[in-house]
Image (cartoon, rainbow, N blue to C red):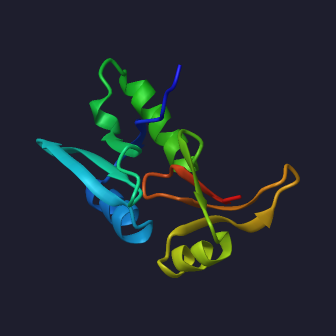
C-alpha cells in the first residue's frame, strides 16, 4: 500500500498572526484561507510541494469541547505542549538565523542532538512547537 501525508492540522488562536508567521516568516505558500464569521482555516505548505499541507484551524472550531477542555488546551498551547510540527531544511543554521532575525520566538538554538540530528526550534504565534532539522 502506498500512502503520502496530504495534510496535518495545527490549532491557531489568531488568524492574522498565524498567516504572517507561516507565510512571511517560514515562507510557506497559502493554499486556502476559508473564513466563517471570525474563524479562519488557513491551509499552507512548502513551495514546490503541492501535495503536502498544514491546515491551521481555530481552536474554537473543535465541536464538543467543554469550557474546561478549551481552557486546558489554551494553557497547553501557551506552554507549547499541545501540538508540534517537524520540518527539515538543507541548512538549519542559516534557517535559524533568518527566523531569529524575524523576531520569531526561539525555543532552542541549533544543537547537535545525541540521537543524530542537528535541529533548532521555535514557537508559532499560538504556541505550537516548530522543530526544524538539518536534512540529510
Q: Please report the residue visible at 40 percent of the width from the left and 41 percent of the height from the top.
A: 11
Determine the image quadrant of residue 27: bottom left
Q: Residue furthest right?
A: 114
Reply above or below: 70 against 20. Answer: above
Q: Residue at x 62, y 67 (%)?
A: 90
Residue 27 position (above or below residue 54): below
Q: Position of residue 129 (x, y in %)?
A: 57, 51
On screen, residue 1 above or below 25: above
Q: Residue furthest left?
A: 37
Where, quadrant-wise, is the C terminus in this rendering?
Answer: bottom right
The picture places residue 44, in percent across and down from the top left corner, at 34, 52
Q: Residue at x 49, y 32 (%)?
A: 72
Q: Is residue 101 above or below residue 11?
A: below
Picture coordinates of residue 83, whole percent (x, y) = 53, 40
The residue sitting at 48% across, 33% down in the picture is 4
Q: Nearer the viewer, residue 31 or 71?
A: 31
Q: Nearer the viewer, residue 131 or 40?
A: 131
Q: Using residue 11 as the reference point, say whether residue 77 is left or right of it.
A: right
Give left or right: position of 55 versus 69.
Answer: left
Amino acid at each position: 500500500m502506498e500512502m503520502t501525508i496530504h495534510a496535518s492540522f495545527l490549532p491557531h488562536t489568531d488568524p492574522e498572526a498565524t498567516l504572517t508567521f507561516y507565510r512571511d516568516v517560514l515562507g510557506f505558500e497559502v493554499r486556502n484561507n476559508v473564513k466563517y464569521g471570525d474563524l479562519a482555516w488557513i491551509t499552507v505548505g512548502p513551495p514546490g510541494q503541492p501535495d503536502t499541507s498544514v491546515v491551521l484551524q481555530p481552536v474554537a472550531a473543535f465541536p464538543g469541547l467543554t469550557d474546561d477542555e478549551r481552557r486546558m488546551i489554551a494553557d497547553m498551547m501557551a506552554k507549547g505542549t499541545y501540538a508540534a510540527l517537524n520540518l527539515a531544511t538543507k541548512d538549519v543554521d542559516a534557517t535559524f538565523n533568518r527566523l531569529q532575525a524575524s523576531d520569531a520566538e526561539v525555543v532552542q538554538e541549533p544543537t547537535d542532538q545525541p540521537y543524530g540530528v542537528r535541529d533548532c526550534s521555535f514557537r508559532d504565534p499560538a504556541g505550537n512547537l516548530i522543530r526544524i532539522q538539518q536534512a540529510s
